[in-house]
Amino acid sequence: MTDRIRLEGLEVEAVVGVYPHEHLAPQRLVLEVSVQTDTREAGLSDTLGHTVDYDQIAQICRAVAAERLHLIEAFAERVAARVLALDGARVERVWVRVAKPQAVPGARTVAVEIERSAR
């Protein structure tokens, strides 16, 4: 299956990092989530219940952002696991990218990308 639902450029504020100065204030993270699913039924029926609700994906990202984590790798894993566990969703695979723009002076961003399967 090659159908995908994508959430691109979602910005969240999160306290994430291993260094003491990173725990003082939230930092901006930029998220990308791509869900592999079969969209044919939703396309034919025009019914939200036949697809993956991208608003739920955004809510998952915001909920993970409210947690205090050390690594953006952990952030990505939590998002992926929760998207795969969505009730009634037909998620086959999920790809998550978490970027931390101000992490390294002189670099535009640092990021982690993961891909996980429902199987």
Image: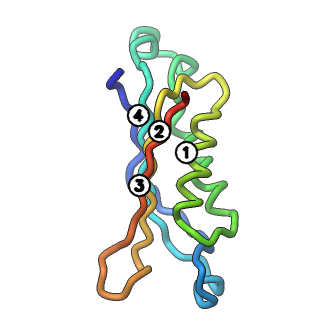
Q: Residues within 10 Å of mark 2 (few under 14, many from 20)?
A: many
Q: Residues within 10 Å of mark 1 (few under 14, many from 20)?
A: many
Image quadrant in which you'd find residue 106: bottom left
Circle 1: residue type = Ala
Residue 36, position as x, y percentages in the image:
42, 30
Which one is nearer the viewer's eye here, 101 or 42?
101
Mark 4 to mark 3: distance in Å? 17 Å
Image quadrant where one finds the C terminus: top right
Which numbered dot is residue 41?
none
Q: Which residue is mark 4?
A: 5
Is 25 above or below relative to 32? below
The first of marks 3 and 1 along the sequence is 1
Q: Which residue is mark 3?
A: 113
In the displayed structure, does residue 28 sit left or right of residue 26?
A: left
Q: Residue at x 58, y 49 (%)?
A: 79
Discs 2, 1 touching: Cβ within 8 Å: yes
In the displayed structure, does residue 104 sit left or right of residue 90?
A: left
Image quadrant where one finds the N terminus: top left
Q: Which residue is mark 2?
A: 94
Q: Residues within 10 Å of mark 4 (few under 14, many from 20)?
A: some
Circle 3: residue type = Glu
The first of marks 2 and 1 along the sequence is 1
Mark 1 to mark 4: distance in Å? 14 Å
Q: Nearer the viewer, mark 1 or mark 4?
A: 1
Mark 2 to mark 1: distance in Å? 6 Å
